Amino acid sequence: MARILLVEDNEVNRVMLCRRLEQRGYQMTSAETGEECLELATAAPPDLILMDLGLPGIDGWETTRRLKANASTLFVPVIALSAHAHESDREHAITAGCVEFETKPVQLAVLVKKIEAALAVKSQTATPTSDDESIFGDLELPTNLSSPGSLTAILRIAPAPTQIEHDSCPIARKHILVVEDNDPNRVMLCRRLQKQGFQTTEARDGREALALARGGTPFDLMLLDIMMPEVDGYQVLSEMKGDPVLQTLPIIMISALDEMASVVKCIELGAEDYLQKPYDPVLLQARVNACLDKRRLRDQELEYLRAVADLTTAAAAVENGNFNTHALQAVAQREDELGRLARVFQKMAEQVHTREQTLRKEVQRLQVEIDEVRKTEQVAEITETSYFQQLQAKAFELRKRYRRNGEE
């Protein structure tokens, strides 16, 4: 009987999926958070892990990377579960080390086929061939796992080498700014978010929300009530999206208004999503996780574009002859193909710089030699003239005359 660990923070989804898979004959264990998953999987590695990507705290991507960086869980196949069906989400999940990707709501028949396929690949591992040994000879395999028999299977189960993270790397909790003028509603909402693993900061009105947002504290998301005295949610949203520094902060509008015009206005002003009061806790969590996922992917894209801009600037600097060898240090530390390109470019630029310095010194040495030759030629041109020779003869006669006068 295959042992499956389901990592899902939504209790309803977790209980329902465990029950349905147990009816299919699987032995199920569950975890609510990434931290709990890492603890359970390390203590007793399961045969397969079903990983929800939108987890609070340590999300599913980071949890998978940590599993793949741990020798005891390195070869445990992970199937990602996500409410997003975008191809980029699938690619990020595979890059993190997942073997498959399944969108929510889960179609049980499809999921079971993927589970069986992943378990079949894992069960087919045997003694490695000589070629496999030469590639994985330095890899320390966990003692409770038979040796992998197929290079393809290893690459499918193992993590992408460029995405491995250090286990000791601290992961900050997502920080949410909750803006609500009703005290009971605000306290209840913050308490619910904190229970899900988020860090919260409260704002009682629009002015306080803008002051907190501009105060330098980095927030990952804002939950913004529309109906507030003085500065309402529309005004706050408009000012946030008009500020170049704050416009990237995702905002979910919360309101008791059930009007399509209000929803349209919020979306047009730049809101990420809209929730009606009283909101469903499960829907709230899904919307929050979805917005945080979008923010994370957008931040990754912006970081990538900044790295590309740094490379472009460095290329122009090389052409202008003022390249700084430390200009690409941050990009070169990336573990993806862009980082590899930056390292190669940095090495080539350093070699070009070294060659230029050597050529400059050689030119300077040649210039000194040329100057010496020119001086010699100029002296020869002067001394070889008849006028100089006549002067030289007269000087000789004068020196003889002075010597005779001195002797007399």
Image (cartoon, rainbow, N blue to C red):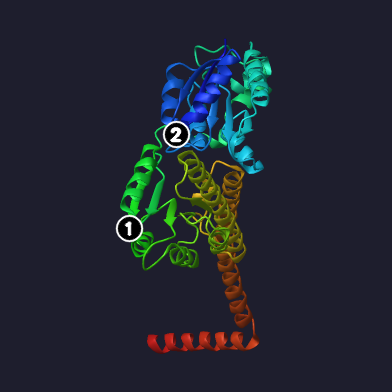
Residue 404 position in % (x across, y down) = 43, 87
Residue identifier under label 1: 204
The secondary element bearing badge 1 is classed as loop
Is 182 placed above or below 90 here? Answer: below
Residue identifier under label 2: 166
**Amino acid on which the number 2 mark rests in the picture:** His
Q: Is label 1 or label 2 in front?
A: 1
Quadrant housing the N terminus: top right
The quadrant in which residue 158 appears is top right
Residue 170 position in % (x across, y down) = 39, 38
- Please tell me which residue lies in front, 331 or 16: 16
**Amino acid on which the number 1 mark rests in the picture:** Arg
The secondary element bearing badge 2 is classed as loop
Is 104 placed above or below 230 here? Answer: above
- Please tell me which residue lies in front, 252 or 12: 12
User: Can residue 408 be seen in the rendering of this structure?
Assistant: no
- Please tell me which residue lies in front, 141 or 277: 277
The quadrant in which residue 316 appears is bottom right
Give the label on residue 190, or none: none
Give left or right: position of 196 versus 147: left
Instruction: State the separation of the CA atoms marked 1 and 2.
Output: 39 Å
How many marks can you see?
2
